[in-house]
Image: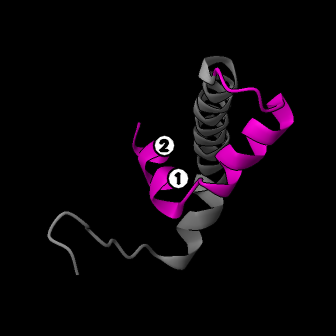
Amino acid sequence: MHSEIKVIFMPANTTSILQPMNQRAFSTSKFYYLRNISHKAIAVIANDSSDRSKQSKLKSFWKGFTILDAIKNIHS
């Protein structure tokens, strides 16, 4: 275990009560994640001055996108 991770066990019947709240939190997190990654992808296309096509730049961006990048995006 990691010192910054806290695991909490909840009774089985509490999940149905928390479901609407969890869904809203997930939807909000997903929105910000997709917004951040879209801004980064657009910045790569806009800031690259090479002669490659925009589609090629975007493809290179996604090929270079790692799990660490995803974690950093979630953190931000």
Compared with 26, 5 (above or below) is below
State the residue in front, 9 or 36. 36
Q: Quick one: label 2, few (<14), some, or many (20+) residues within 10 Å?
A: some
**What x and y, as percent, mark residue 19?**
65, 55
State the residue in front, 20 or 70. 70
In the rendered image, residue 55 lying in the magenta stretch gets the answer yes
The residue located at (67%, 36%) in the rendering is 34
Compared with 18, 67 (above or below) is below
The C terminus lies in which quarter of the figure? top left
**What x and y, as percent, mark residue 14?**
54, 65
Q: Which residue of the protein is positioned furthest toward the bottom in this rendering?
A: 1
- Does dot 1 land on a helix, a strand or a loop? helix
The N terminus lies in which quarter of the figure? bottom left
Q: Quadrant of residue 49?
A: top right
The residue located at (67%, 18%) in the rendering is 46
- Which span is picked out in magenta? 49-76
The residue located at (52%, 52%) in the rendering is 70
- Does dot 2 land on a helix, a strand or a loop? helix
**What x and y, as percent, mark residue 11?**
46, 76
State the residue in front, 49 or 41. 49
Mark 2 touches mark 1? (CB < 8 Å) = yes
* Label disc, if present, on residue 73 of the rendered structure: 2
The residue that disc 1 covers is 70
